[in-house]
Image (spheres, rainbow, N blue to C red):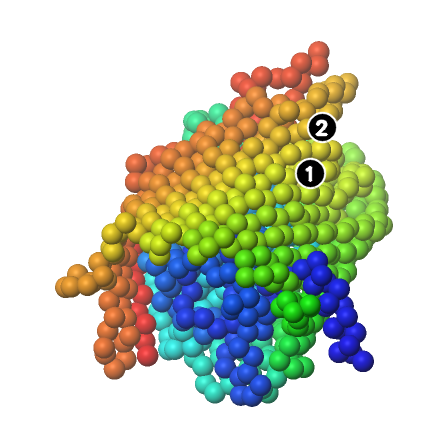
Amino acid sequence: MFRSCLLSSASALALLAVCDGAAAQTAASTLPAITVDAPRQAQAGPRKKRAVAHRGTPRSFRPQPAVAVIPSPVPTESLLATLHQAPIGQPQTTIGRDQFDNRPSFSVADVLRDSPGISVKQGNGPRDFGISIRGSNARNGFGIRNLVIFDDGFPVTQPDGLSRSDLIDPHAYGAIDVIRGPSSALYGNYATGGALNFRTRRGAAINGFEYGSDAGSYGYFNNYLTVGQKTGNFEASLFASDTRSDGYTGNTWFNTQTVNFLGTLQATPDDRLTFKLINNTLDARLAIRSSLNQFDANPFQRGCATAATAAPGCGTVSLFNNGFNTVAGTTPTTAEQAGFGRTDRRTIVGGRWEHDFDNQTTWRNQFVFDDRNISQPTGATGAIGDYPSYNLMSDIVRRSQIFGMDATGYLGVFYNTLSWSGDTYRVMPGGNASRGWLVSNLTGMHTNYGARARGEIQINESWSAVAGIGWETTHLKGVNTAYTYAGPTGIPTTTINSVDRQLQNTAPEFALQYRADKDWLFRARVATGYGTPQVGNLFVLPNGQNGNNTQLNPQRNLGYDLGFDWTPDPTLRISATGFYEFFRDELVTQAAPLGAPNASYTFNAPKSEHRGVELLAQWRFLPSWRVTAAYTYLDQIYTSYTENINNGATFSFNRAGNKIPGISPNELTARLSYDQLSGALQGVGAFVELQWKDAFYMDNANLLKAPGYELVNLNVHYDKPLQSEYLKSFHLYFEVRNVFDKTFVASANNIANTVTAAGLQNPASVLANTGGSIYAGQPRMFIAGMRLAFR
């Protein structure tokens, strides 16, 4: 009975068609260094009985990606079969470990730039980077939003859509999948831009242990250890790192530790159990975000020990002397003087059980507990809170034939919830982020639940199609209590706002893929995405004060993709994708005025359009020489948005046709590399890398621009296999980053426009004094590293 029902569901889906790549677990020979715009096939370990060579589309069923320029040294039989993968027709880039194994990769910013469509900006912490796919997160003030992130298929995006990259140390990973475009049909809420999946190295690939150490300018030091082994039916890997630095900007020293464990047990021939643990602790100090004029005068906030003796360009924040109101006056304070920073912990524990009913049917169940615990006195106010979340999912995949055509049906359900419990308090003068009185308390729940279905069909040897749909209900429930204090004794007054909303969203998608011949692969796709506000957005007004902003609506986007991969031979590959996306009620975040209780606020832009082009090229023009380039063009505009600005009276401005701030129109990462393949110098290599980011607007009126930049990085490395009884290999590298010591903007949060009493918009010269926006990028830095691999 169960099987016949499942077959009926899968058959109905397959008439529309295509496999959820999440179900695929296949065996291949090697992982390409970068596999662009073709779905990655995951690998499963050997089975004792009823071996399933391909849990998904058979190898002849799906056009294979062309051979990449340099294969990864990691054998694919040791790679993890991931929970989620892009279906055919959707742009996807897989960045292999060989792309970042020979450099001191400190953060995701050092790795993800190798994929088109990706942009990054510095966040509030050493490894806290804003990651954008097609500009998805460029409009957000902190953290990562509008895309969903996984670690070995386990979600590290919490139910409210917030991800942070603090816990990501690139040394731990074997590959990274970048899935581009609206993806809510498969990934649900917040996948308006796409998804990322970080894949740790498997135990069998490590087969021993490795110790590495990186050291460089500004007191940077990273010790890390990797241990991995496969014994019988059990395979495990453990990564641990301890990283610290004095920081290149004043008041930005940090100390962070990361542990990442993955264990897989083949409990029976039909049952696989996977366990995941990630833990990150962070102790960091933070600078004050600058205005453009402050950045020009003092980009690295030097000489800012105290406001009284501060050098020109030092950022300051006025703190209430009594910790609750202005009766006792305020004191301008620098970040170093106040002790602004973050002391956070993130713990993720997950488990997955996969069961094969037969060679065609697989059932999976997954549970994840994710706790984010924060203490963040980052400005005039500090935040403290605990945000535990629970994520459950269950799905079934059935492989069969429909009218003689190979087909796969997928059906899944999910439930996730996050508990809000956070306080915002005033920071007082005196140093050590002295805690003043309570500003607000927010409690609530953010819950998502729904179902998703997908069908895949191989129409013939050249054509494949996929259709999917996701349905989701989001329940936002919360109470915000704001406190104000009158008089010298601080007589309290409370203002309470609450919300209890249910939001329904549906996301269909459809894609076609055509293999013209061995050289040409063409793709077409139409898909949708959605993202609801988080509870915290609903209680912040445009002036940064606590209040009622509960009218916020979910954002939705409809996107069209056309693309191709051209691989005339194994030494050359060119991939291109053009996209056009239509947004409704786009959620846009801007910086609130300095000194406000909240650092940013969020609003809906009724209509906007995003279009662009993503290009990736690889060319090995000689056996030892290779050129790679990843380029992204973005053009994003408001098509319907009237902004109201209050200055005693309210003035309205039509923003239709204006560029959306925070979006760099052109970004490029290009690399020329050399690796000696034989002879006495075998293992010696070097590369020169160019990073270009175009200038972009910082405000809705398009009056002020953050300057663009071009950076050059140089790297030399040496990888020596060893035949010792105990040592397997010895690896050295040295890198100079920002060779020409360019001063550049690494992050610029959107700023609000202002008006005169007469209702005229203030010009760029006035906006350039608006603080709370800019962090400077890293000046010239020297880093050396080594790694030993033991048997």
The circle on residue 583 is 1
- Compared with 324, 359 (above or below) is below
- Compared with 352, 290 (above or below) is above
Tag 2: Cα neighbours inside 10 Å, few (<14), some, or many (≥20)?
A: some
Q: State which mark lies toward you, 1 or 2.
A: 1
At x 32%, y 79%, the residue is: 791
At x 64%, y 39%, the residue is: 581
Residue 111 coordinates in the image, percent (x, y): 43, 52
User: In terms of secondary structure, where does tag 2 sit?
Assistant: loop
Residue 640 coordinates in the image, percent (x, y): 72, 28
- Compared with 518, 46 (above or below) is below
Tag 1: Cα neighbours inside 10 Å, few (<14), some, or many (≥20)?
A: many
User: How many numbered markers are drawn?
Assistant: 2
Callout 1, which amino acid? Phe
The residue wearing badge 2 is 641
Residue 410 coordinates in the image, percent (x, y): 69, 66
Can residue 121 be seen?
no
Callout 2, which amino acid? Tyr
At x 71%, y 43%, the residue is: 556
The circle on residue 661 is none
- Compared with 577, 236 (above or below) is below
Tell whether 378 sits left or right of 11.
Answer: left
Tell whether 274 sits left or right of 420.
Answer: left
Tell whether 76 sits left or right of 569.
Answer: right
Quadrant assignment, res 494:
top right
User: In terms of secondary structure, where does tag 1 sit?
Assistant: strand
Outermost residue toward the left in this view: 680
Quadrant assignment, res 311:
top left
Q: Earlier in the sequence, mark 1 or mark 2?
A: 1
397 and 767: which one is in front?
397
